[in-house]
Image: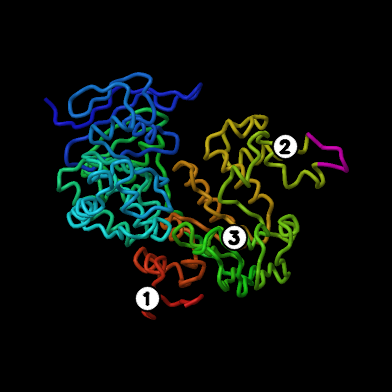
Amino acid sequence: MNDYIVEMTNITKSFGDVKAVVDGQFNLKKGEIHSLIGENGAGKSTMMKMLYGIYPNDSGTIKIKGKEVQGLTPNIAIKDGIGMVHQEFMLVNELTVLENIILGFEPTKNITIDFDKAKKEIQKYIDTYNMDIQPGKKINQIPLGEAQRVEIIKTLYRGAEIVILDEPTAVLTPQETVKFFEILNSMKADGKSIVFISHKLKEVMEISDRITVMRDGQYMNTVNKEDTDIDELAKLMVGREVFLNVKKKDVVVGETVLKIDNLWTSGEKELSKIKGISLDVKQGEILGIAGIDGNGQSELIEAITGLRKVEKGKVILDGEDITNKSPLKIRKSGMTHIPEDRNIRGLNRKLSIKDNMIAVKIDKKPYSKGLVLNNKEIDSFTKDLIERFDVRPTNPEILTEALSGGNAQKIVVAREVDADGKLLIASQPTRGVDIGAIESIRKILNEVKANGKGIILVSADLDEILSLSDRIAVMYEGKITGILDAKNGNENNIGLLMMGGKLGHNDSEDIGGNL
């Protein structure tokens, strides 16, 4: 008899004509941390959503604690001791931490909620796993890292022995990740079984006991952590060797191409209002902007690119004041932009690859004359970009809605890089794309820099920031907490700045911004 607390064998799942899982295999032992990894669309989240009862499996067998289960729903999964913390937290902002944890499972005394009993029960989890939460505060008053701990306690309060975590470190600073891993190891020592879904291979190697790899909906292999390494895992995920660490090209920086002076603008929420930011970017350098999502990065880029009104301050591009000009005029002044959400601002998914690639040049010669299009030149241009940027499939007439996330993103990158601007804004350029596309996009950005262009790189991936940037500006609550030379940057000092801290003068040669 095996010692698996979960067994999933020969699992299939389709959504219409799309086969999300073809041959899903996964098992989990009591008291282990088992990572499930794969590229976007590999089927890993779909597998766990079937285990949690969100999706029914089309075929295959699911066993929990040795018993085969059918017709799983989240309620049944919870009764069977399974909890899931999703990428998007399932918390009610207007309720307190305590109210969120007990919602739907409220202890009662006579006909009222027994809050004292609930507080004592929750305090046990806080003490056992050293989780720092504030039960009396509302969800909209606490940081993302604490909200995640609330989600975990919520699953434990409901009796979870098996906890599924979907991309759990995406909202954490490096310091918070260290603390989070301490919590996971405490839970493991207490006999809890944890499924860790992630694409961050360094973290996977740090926290896992075993690792299962999926590719294109199929099970590839399960390995013990001590028997593998990052390179082997990446190769299993993609099917070939992958090189994510781009060797920076030494380029002598030129004149200042962008100057941001005392910029103020509104925010989607209070913490993301831009409050007096000053920055500059030079020719031939990549300025990385790091920070936890929601601290004003999106608003800063929107203000620079004309998508959000600047309330105070100036944006100067190559000596020209472009403050509050339209996005079209700013583009004509020499700024190109890879937006953070390709589907909202980067592509028209109902149009073809060709239509999306030619979009910013369709009114220029030789692609048109007046209202007449030169289809021969357009076709030649599109095919050239498809080849140069390795977009697949190669048929320019295919609609972009039929493409994978990585290939859709390559269309945006190809169009904006080919536009040959003075400054490229690359906002989350590898978000939601697979490892192979990440490798390609990082190389492209490095080549743009080598050609003497200035780049602003905004990324939630700190490894990407460290790998590509020449200087790094860190944002916290709408301000710059520090600017440092990339050679002095590391997870510790950048993480400190991401939490609003300050560095000593020995931590960096170049500290500036709103300190």
Please say if 382 is above or below 1.
below
Q: Which residues are magenta?
A: 368-375
Quarter of the figure that contains the N terminus: top left
Amino acid type indicated by mark 2: Ser
Q: Earlier in the sequence, mark 1 or mark 3?
A: 3
Task: Classify 145 as above or below 232.
Answer: below
Furthest toward the left, the residue is: 1
Label 1 SS? loop
What amino acid is at disc 1?
Answer: Asp
Local packing at callout 1 (Cα closer than 10 Å; few below 14, some 14-19, many 20+) is some
Q: Is residue 75 visible?
A: yes
| Whole-percent x, y for residue 500 in the image | 41, 70
Distance CA(mark 2)–CA(mark 3): 33 Å
Whole-Å distance between the Cαs marked 1 and 3?
A: 28 Å
* Type of amino acid at the residue the image marks with label 3: Ile
- In the image, residue 170 lies at what x, y percent? 40, 51
Q: Which residue is mark 2?
A: 380
Rendered residue at 27%/60% (across/down):
132
Task: Give left or right: position of 403 versus 460.
Answer: right
